[in-house]
């Protein structure tokens, strides 16, 4: 059974909404997992620190704390620079989302108008039959419907291109597992919570 254009567009919109819902759910799960991992590592780091206090010479401990703080400061600066890149990428994605929403709304409006003309044409054809084909008004309606169909097709192509551009823009960041780990942990931001040892380890990760 063939699917009409409006039905295909509606199915595509529904599929896109399902994909976005799945993406949101996956993001939430990743955030919760990262939070649990951070808490576990924080506990481990605290145990390591306590062990270090027991085994290390007290004279060495301040030097270790200083090294951790220095590494943390350097790593935080590097992460801030990366965060700026992410912010720019997020802004670009937001702009593309807005453009996509606008194109979707325009497409819906064009589709609504197109369907209205199709209904009018069908009603006229049913009422007048073959005679209507010779009527100038019918020819004008048919021409207008064809133009609207082409506009709808162009809008669909623009929407698909916007989706592809958005996915390509965010791919480098999603494909970097180390950066995603630091980003989800809030490293270098006010929400970051970790002891010195964990900060030191995260600093090493940020410097990779």
Image: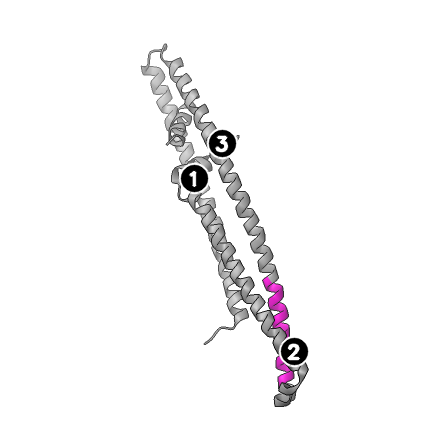
Q: Quadrant of the N terminus?
A: bottom left
Q: Residue at x 45, y 50 (%)?
A: 168
Q: Residue at x 50, y 63 (%)?
A: 12
Q: Position of residue 82 (x, y in %)?
A: 47, 35
Determine if the magenta segment contains residue 112: yes
Kindly report which numbered mark, 2 or 3, lies closer to the viewer in this rendering: 2
Q: Which comes before the other along the chain, label 2 or label 3? A: 3
Quadrant in which residue 178 is drawn: top left
In the image, the segment drawn in magenta is 107-125
Q: Nearer the viewer, residue 76 or 96?
A: 96
Looking at the rendered structure, the secondary structure element under dot 3 is helix
Looking at the rendered structure, the secondary structure element under dot 2 is helix
Q: Which residue is mark 1?
A: 180
Kindly report which numbered mark, 3 or 1, lies closer to the viewer in this rendering: 3
Q: Which comes before the other along the chain, label 3 or label 1? A: 3
Relative height, residue 148 to residue 95 (above, below): below
The tag on residue 67 is none
Q: Which residue is mark 3?
A: 80
Contact, CB < 8 Å: mark 2 with mark 1?
A: no
Q: Which residue is mark 2?
A: 140
Q: Position of residue 127 (x, y in %)?
A: 65, 87
């Amino acid at each position: 059974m063939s699917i009409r254009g409006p039905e295909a567009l509606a199915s595509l919109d529904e599929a896109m909404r399902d994909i976005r819902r799945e993406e949101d759910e996956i993001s939430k799960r990743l955030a919760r997992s990262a939070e649990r991992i951070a808490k576990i590592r924080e506990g481990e780091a605290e145990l390591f620190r306590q062990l270090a206090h027991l085994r290390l010479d007290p004279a060495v401990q301040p030097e270790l704390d200083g090294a951790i703080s220095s590494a943390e400061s350097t790593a935080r600066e590097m992460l801030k620079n990366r965060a700026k890149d992410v912010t720019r990428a997020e802004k670009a994605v937001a702009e593309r989302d807005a453009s996509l929403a606008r194109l979707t709304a325009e497409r819906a409006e064009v589709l609504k108008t197109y369907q209205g003309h199709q209904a009018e044409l069908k009603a006229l054809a049913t009422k007048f039959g073959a005679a209507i084909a010779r009527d100038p008004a019918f020819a004008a309606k048919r021409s207008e419907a064809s133009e609207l169909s082409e506009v709808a097709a162009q809008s669909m192509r623009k929407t698909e291109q916007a989706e592809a551009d958005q996915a390509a823009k965010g791919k480098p960041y999603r494909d970097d597992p180390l950066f995603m780990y630091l980003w989800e942990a809030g490293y270098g931001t006010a929400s970051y919570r970790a002891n010195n040892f964990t900060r030191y380890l995260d600093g090493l990760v940020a410097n990779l």
